[in-house]
């Protein structure tokens, strides 16, 4: 498990902001612990390890800039990225599915995606691939980034202030946050036959060498 507390204490506010940025700006950032990282950083700020004002502001800026970079990647390189039919994430079907989702839910998708691990990495890219204007994207990017960074970080901060010896309960709290954050994505994949079929295909390719 990613050691959040030692990392945050060692890397500080810039390290937290860097992870938040990378989660949206880099297509490999979907494995990074954005929600639990912000919550834990907020909790440590309540104990005096970090400045809460600098923490939330820097995380907010990193989140907005990261999503904007993701949008730019989708705008410039989207068709080349989403061309592999065998890829679970980067395939033409994902573009079509994302466009339908945007048509159904509108620009608020940008806000909702902030609270869904993995999804928040790819939504800015797909928004860039699609027809969403950057001005519209930026508006909802700022709003979603604010709600996500300030909400989760300050949640950890005020919980740390309110509960004595909160560090004794930190591990189960982090596990609960991770579970609740990935649950909607897991449910979506489980309910989608195409997603399940692609996932089975990928797993079979991974396990095939070990069966020889």
Image: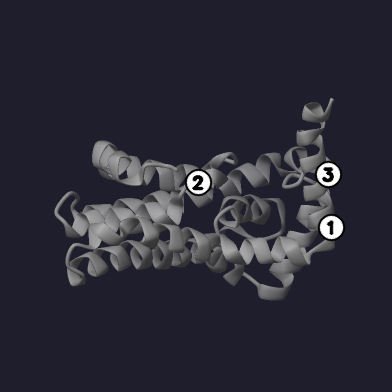
Name the side, left or right, on which 20 lies relative to 157: right
x and y, in percent, of residue 160 in the image: 22, 64
Q: In the rendering, which numbered label is found on residue 23? A: 2
Labels 1 and 2 touching (C-beta < 8 A): no
- Quadrant of the snapshot with the C terminus: top right
Residue lying at the far front in this picture: please name it. 211
Pick whichever, 72 or 41, lies toward us: 41
x and y, in percent, of residue 76 in the image: 67, 41
> What residue sits right under mark 3 in the picture?
201
Q: Earlier in the sequence, mark 1 or mark 3?
A: 1
In whole angstroms, how far apart are the C-alphas of marks 3 and 2?
26 Å
Does any portion of residue 83 appear in the rendered image? no
Pick whichever, 10 or 73, lies toward us: 10
| Res 190 quadrant in image | bottom right
Q: In the rendering, which numbered label is found on residue 121? A: none
> What residue sits right under mark 1 in the picture?
194
Q: Earlier in the sequence, mark 3 or mark 2?
A: 2
Name the side, left or right, on which 155 lies relative to 177: left
In whole angstroms, how far apart are the C-alphas of marks 1 and 2?
25 Å
Secondary element type, mark 1: helix
Q: Nearer the viewer, mark 3 or mark 2?
A: 3
Q: Please give the name of the residue rendered at 74% of the width and 44% of the height, measured from the top-left corner.
A: 90
Secondary element type, mark 3: helix
Pick whichever, 49 or 71, lies toward us: 49
Q: Please give the name of the residue rendered at 77% of the width and 28% of the height, measured from the top-left corner.
A: 210
Name the side, left or right, on which 97 lies relative to 114: right
Q: Please give the name of the residue rendered at 55% of the width and 56% of the height, measured from the top-left corner.
A: 117
Q: Earlier in the sequence, mark 1 or mark 2?
A: 2
x and y, in percent, of residue 33 in the image: 46, 49
Query: Crowding at label 1, few (<14), some or many (≥20) Cα neighbours within 10 Å?
Result: few
């Amino acid at each position: 498990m990613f050691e959040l507390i030692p990392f945050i204490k060692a890397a500080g506010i810039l390290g937290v902001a860097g992870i938040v940025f990378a989660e949206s700006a880099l297509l490999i950032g979907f494995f990074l612990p954005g929600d639990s990282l912000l919550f834990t950083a907020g909790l440590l700020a309540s104990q005096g390890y970090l400045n809460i004002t600098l923490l939330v502001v820097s995380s907010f800026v990193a989140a907005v800039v990261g999503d904007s970079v993701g949008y730019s990647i989708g705008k410039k390189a989207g068709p080349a990225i989403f061309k592999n039919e065998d890829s679970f994430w980067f395939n033409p079907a994902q573009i079509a599915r994302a466009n339908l989702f945007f048509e159904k839910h509108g620009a608020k998708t940008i806000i909702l995606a902030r609270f869904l691990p993995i999804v928040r990495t790819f939504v800015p890219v797909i928004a860039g691939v699609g027809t969403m204007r950057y001005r519209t994207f930026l508006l909802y990017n700022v709003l979603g980034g604010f709600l996500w960074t300030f909400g989760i970080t300050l949640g950890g901060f005020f919980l740390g202030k309110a509960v004595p010896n909160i560090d004794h309960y930190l591990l189960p709290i982090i596990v609960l946050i991770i579970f609740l954050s990935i649950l909607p994505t897991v449910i979506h994949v489980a309910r989608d036959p195409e997603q399940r079929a692609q996932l089975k295909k990928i797993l079979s390719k991974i396990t095939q060498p070990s069966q020889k």
